[in-house]
Image (cartoon, grey):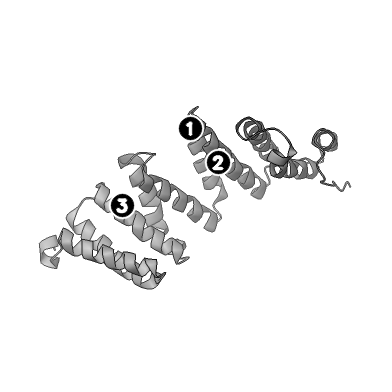
Amino acid sequence: MSAEDHGWTEDKIGRLAVKADKAARKKNWRRAIRYGEDMLAGTKALYPETSPDYINRLKTLNRYYDRAERLLEVSERIHRAFELSAVHLGPDHTTTKVSHLLYYKLLLAEKDYPAAIMLVKDTLARLGASEDDQFKRLHYLGQLYSLYGLTGQFEREEQALRERLTLNRLMVGEGLENNADILLDLAKNLCTQKKYQSHDALVEAWGTNFICLRN
């Protein structure tokens, strides 16, 4: 059945998009999703999946599901939006960034930590040397060491923490006040690994307050 058979036009889809947005502004996620589903169906009838119109509206609908805490219901769409936006809109497009975030949140919700680690590592590998990218690197290194901790990969967690500490000192500043959170996590990591000499050296050098209970 064609788009004409359903009476789909860009104007009709636009009206649905406005209704969905109004519902979203009121945080009525059930209604936003209902209008959003119709909006996406109409868009799919008029445009190919590779078009910016379809990808942007798919992202919008995915956000409604996220706000409704229903990401797991649309896992295939979340993954699809991530792939489509990366290929057809490019890494710097707002839709791509949102789709990347939603895909990462989905992987965490599914407890698919290996896939989340690969996603973060791939993102890190794509970053350049600009100041903006270095601050992004700080952010993603934070995600990476947390994921290594969740999966019990403590040596890799330590490596990511040390890399983040070095970069944070460069980009944010020296001193305990600028690095306390990272140092505390590193101290905990060294204690978990029973690297007591390294732990004690860290505490002495920075004056951190973390107490390592030793077996």
Q: Which residue sits at x=62%, y=35%?
A: 172
Quarter of the image for the N terminus: give it.
bottom left
Q: Which residue sits at x=42%, y=69%?
A: 27
At label 2, the amino acid type is Tyr
Q: Residues within 10 Å of mark 2 (few under 14, many from 20)?
A: some
Residues under numbered marks 1 and 2 in contact, where contact means CB atoms less than 8 Å apart = yes
At label 1, the amino acid type is Leu
Sequence-first tag of 2 and 3:
3
Residues under numbered marks 3 and 1 in contact, where contact means CB atoms less than 8 Å apart = no
Q: Position of residue 180 (x, y in %)?
A: 72, 42
- What residue is disc 3 on? 56
At label 3, the amino acid type is Asn
- What residue is disc 2 on? 140
Q: Nearer the viewer, residue 200 or 192?
A: 200
Q: CA distance from mark 2 to mark 3?
A: 24 Å
Q: Position of residue 141 (x, y in %)?
A: 59, 39
Q: Position of residue 83 (x, y in %)?
A: 37, 45
Q: Choose top left, top right, bottom left or bottom right for residue 34.
A: bottom left
Sequence-first tag of 1 and 2:
1
Q: Residues within 10 Å of mark 1 (few under 14, many from 20)?
A: few
- What residue is disc 1 on? 127
